[in-house]
């Protein structure tokens, strides 16, 4: 099973790029973030024509998450992160696909910090950590994939001081990601590439793609059962270089059936 996550940064504006990547990469499961489309505007017909069933929770202008399954229909089990009924932001969806539970997340950016947006980011990740712990305890095969909006370590960002005050690299943000690993989740990219410099996001500004001035924001975390079956993982960097591309590249992990 090939599982991928892709912050598409507007699913309708970049539908051609998404469909072309699906045709070449042929992932079995895809987690999408930043749909930037209301539920009714999700391009279901085009995605089905490409051979994928889908469940999603959209949101006009911002946010929105979806799970695609090649040759089948994901079975939605949850369309929001538990713990705060007042939270209306579309940032989490969960579905069963071929015996694997897939959690797709779009973590809050949190900027500017300090401030209410950073407070929301930390509170959201606290809720996410609690839910992740419950999932891990079940012993089921679970994947938590998406744009976490966290740079886990200094080596996951290009050499710069321009991000020093950014919410993505703050100690509290990194502690939230570390807490997930401490629960027992396996970071698929780091498991396969323990020493490599890996980026998944390149800002549009200041020629950061051309300079390879990137960040690692998109992560695939695996429960114990799946971590033992991990074969390979990587980043489809070439997708970021396409005309009109998202500022993120797809990340994937191959799991032995």
Image (cartoon, rainbow, N blue to C red):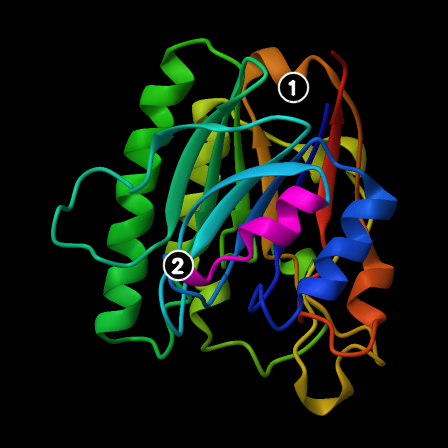
Magenta range: 40-49
Q: Which residue lies furthest to the left in this view?
A: 86
Q: In this view, does 61 lie above or below 66?
A: below
Question: Which one is in front, 49 or 246?
Answer: 49
- On the image, the x and y values in percent for residue 199 come to 73, 59
Q: Are marks 2 and 1 in contact (CB under 8 Å)?
A: no
- Residue 217 lies in what quarter of the image? bottom right
Dot 2: element: helix
Q: Mark 2 points at which residue?
A: 40
Residue occupying image coordinates x 34% and y 36%: 129
Residue 5 appears in view: no
Residue occupying image coordinates x 50% and y 64%: 169
Judge the density around disc 1: few (<14), some (14-19), many (≥20) Cα neighbours within 10 Å. Answer: many
- On the image, the x and y values in percent for residue 220 come to 61, 38
Question: Which one is in front, 147 or 121?
Answer: 147
Dot 1: element: helix
Q: Name the residue under label 1.
A: 227
Nearer-N-terminus badge (2/1): 2
- Residue 187 lies in what quarter of the image? top right
Give the CA distance from mark 2 to mark 1: 36 Å
Position of residue 142 in the picture relative to residue 229 (left or right): left
Position of residue 166 in the picture relative to residue 12 (left or right): left
């Amino acid at each position: 099973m090939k599982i991928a996550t892709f912050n598409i940064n507007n699913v309708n504006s970049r539908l051609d790029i998404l469909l072309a990547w699906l045709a070449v990469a042929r992932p079995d499961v895809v987690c999408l973030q930043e749909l930037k489309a209301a539920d009714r505007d999700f391009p279901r017909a085009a995605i089905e024509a490409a051979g994928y069933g889908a469940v999603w929770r959209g949101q006009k202008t911002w946010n929105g998450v979806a799970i695609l399954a090649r040759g089948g229909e994901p079975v939605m089990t949850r369309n929001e992160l538990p713990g705060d009924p007042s939270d209306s932001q579309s940032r989490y969806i969960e579905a069963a696909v071929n015996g694997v539970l897939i959690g797709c997340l779009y973590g809050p950016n949190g900027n500017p910090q300090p401030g209410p947006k950073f407070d929301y980011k930390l509170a959201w990740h606290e809720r996410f950590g609690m839910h992740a712990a419950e999932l891990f305890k079940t012993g089921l095969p679970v994947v938590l994939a998406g744009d976490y909006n966290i740079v886990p370590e200094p080596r996951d960002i290009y050499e710069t001081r321009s991000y020093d005050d950014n919410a993505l690299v703050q100690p509290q943000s990194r502690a939230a990601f570390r807490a997930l690993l401490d629960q027992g989740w396996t970071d698929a990219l780091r498991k396969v590439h323990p020493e490599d410099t890996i980026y998944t996001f390149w800002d549009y500004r200041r020629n950061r793609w051309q300079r390879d001035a990137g960040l690692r924001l998109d992560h695939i975390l695996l429960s114990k059962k799946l971590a033992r079956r991990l074969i390979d993982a990587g980043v489809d960097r070439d997708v970021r270089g396409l005309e009109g591309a998202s500022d993120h590249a797809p990340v994937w992990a191959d799991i032995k059936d």
